[in-house]
Image (cartoon, helix red, strand yellow):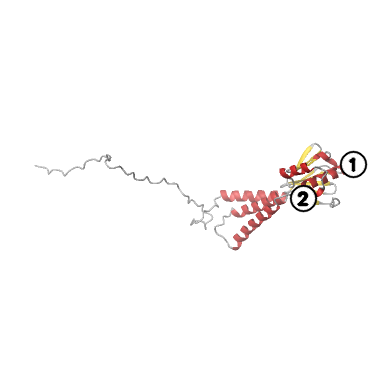
Amino acid sequence: MESEGVATERYRTGGMAYGVIGIGCVLFALVYGVVAAREDYAPWLWPLLVFLAVSFWSVLIRPALVLGADEVELRNALHSRWVPYRLVDGAEGVDVGQVTVVRAEGRRYVASGFGRSRRTMRKDDRRGPDVAEVDHSLGWLIESKLRRRVATAHAERSEATGGVRHAWAWPEVGLRAGSGIASLVLFRAGWAPLAGCPRVRCPRVRCTRRRRWRPAAPRAVRRPPGAPGRRRRPRPGPRAPCST
């Protein structure tokens, strides 16, 4: 392939456009709330919007498969792993399915940012390896590239300088945890005003205005003509004057 000699290559499938759209909507809501000074924005809504923006970034944009010169990086939503080609369990240790799976030192590592759909895998299997590369999908090409790099690393028989490395994405973890906890604490503390409530402007007073369910009044039943009605007690007549 033409890009075989590139030092670092990044690949991801799907989610990029949806992540950008989601972050754009969240930013619009934040800017609108600040510029328009919306009073009906509950205080717990601000950290919730931050939580949504970080979630869109970490789940839909951050995951990727990064091919380096000596190792492959499996970048997921909240953590990353670096696996040297020398430690991969042969060419069969690489599998690009719905997610990318790399087996090294008897363990299985997954990259959720790159993969193929089942329909694409069936098409690649029907075409076979003898078909030109341009007729295959991107997932099949990346799988072949990974297997070639693993085979080259095993053929050179060079000593591995290190093992599999792991690192957490602390900025994403901290922002998601902090904003999520802040929104829950503010919501539980009574910062959830109802729209149209006269107590909205006073944040120290919890709003107790709730809609109570009341049963509907029973409808009057029409009696058919001639049906016996409800018996009524006879009214007492006028009392007779006392005779002395």
Looking at marks 2 and 1 on the same chain, the residue that comes earlier in the sequence is marked by 2
Where's residue 41, x and y in %?
57, 57
Q: Tag 2, which secondary structure?
A: strand
- Tags 2 and 1 in contact by the CB under 8 Å rule? no
| Residue ID for mark 2 | 11
The part of the image, by quadrant, that contains residue 239 is top left
Side (left or right) of 198 relative to 86: left
Q: Find disc 1 in the rendering and name its residue.
A: 155
| Image side of residue 32 versus residue 7, left or right | left
Task: Indicate the position of residue 243 as horizontal and vertical percent values.
Answer: 9, 42
Which residue occupies 81% across, 48% down?
133
Residue 37 percent coordinates (x, y): 58, 62
Residue visible at 62% across and 60% down in the picture: 31
SS at badge 1 = helix
Identify which residue, 217 or 97, lies in the foreground.
97
Q: Residue at x 68, y 55 (%)?
A: 20
Q: Position of residue 222 (x, y in %)?
A: 32, 44
Instruction: Tell which of 97 and 155 is nearer to you.
Output: 97
